[in-house]
Image: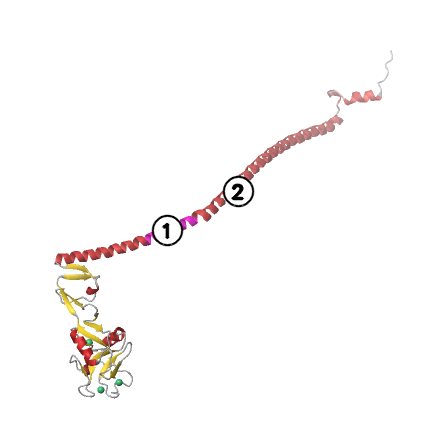
Amino acid sequence: MFIPDPLPSERDQRRTVPSRCEYGSSERPRRNADDRRIIHDFQVRSHLRVAEGEVQTLRTNSCHLQDEMEMTQEYVSQLQRNLSSVLQEYRHLHDTLIPGLRYNQNQHQGALQVIERQRQQQRSKRSKLEEQYRNFLKGNVLIPRTSDLLMDCAAADQDLAMLCPFCPPRWRIYELSCYLQSEEAQNWEESLSWCRERGGFLAVVNDEEEQNFLEGFVNVTAWIGLSDHHREGNWRWVDGTPYESTTWVWGPEQPNNDGDEDCVTLSPASQWSDEECSEKYTSVCERRADQLSLKGVILSN
Ligand SMILES: [Ca+2]
Ligand SMILES: [Ca+2]
Ligand SMILES: [Ca+2]
């Protein structure tokens, strides 16, 4: 029986799968190479698995980072909203509350000033009440100095006796004298009598202060109590006051005895002039003020 040779291809195929026993000593290197390739492939696959794991880890981390970034952005947005709200509240406080507080502060300061004034007034009242109480304990009577009659009162001595100068009706008080100007014009002798009839004398100018008062007191030219009709150039005051002891307030070029001028006048805001005694002028009279003694009285302002 004929058995044909297998086709080369089949033979080769058969050789590709040799039995373990078919390997000769010459095929051992090929086997080592295959082993290395297998080992290499195994190592590559292992590295690939590790790499795939690392890639997966990176993906996971990347995802977490993205989540954290989104949370951070949301947090930043929340902070911005909070900051905007705070700024809005600050503007509201600055525009409304702070001016209101300043207004209230000014109101309070004004109220404090009023209270301080009232406090000072109360202290003053208390001081006066304490003074009144001390005077009450001493047996003194306190009278307010509200009447014109009491305006010139002054304590006379240490016993607190109060002397109050006063004038008759229509007379004007100045220091401790009273003054009255007539309405009718008369000669000097008639004026002298007119004043005596009223308890006074033609005014005697004792000093510059009295002269200043009289210049403001008279409203028209008036006789005063000075003359040299007894002897030319020998001036005498009607009350006996020495002429040399008083202030001389002659006007310009006076006295000039023009003709026969022996009596003296005083004019508003002006000085003395000698005139003829027969001329007619008003009279300015003077008298000492009466004085009322008030013992045990203290005047309060
Ligand atoms: Ca006088
Ligand atoms: Ca004369
Ligand atoms: Ca004259």
Q: Which residue is drawn at 74% across and 28% down?
A: 30
| 10 Å crowding of disc 1: few (<14), some (14-19), many (20+) | few
As displayed, is residue 205 above or below residue 146?
Answer: below
In the image, which residues are magenta? Answer: 98-113
Does dot 1 land on a helix, a strand or a loop? helix
Which numbered disc, 1 or 2, marks the residue closer to the eye? 1
- Which structural element holds mark 2? helix
Which residue occupies the extreme top position in the image? 1
Q: Where is residue 288 in the image (x, y as percent from the top left)?
A: 16, 72
Rendered view: 165 above or below 227: above
Residue at x 30%, y 54% (from the top left corner): 116
Residue 132's label in the rendered image is none
**Residue 49's image quarter?**
top right
Question: What is the spatial separation of the Cα atoms under label 1 and label 2, in whole angstroms?
Answer: 39 Å
Q: Can residue 115 be seen in this view?
A: yes
Compared with 2, 258 (above or below) is below
Residue at which label 2 appears = 80
Secondary structure mostly seen in the magenta stretch? helix
Could you tell whether 108 is left or right of 254 in the image? right
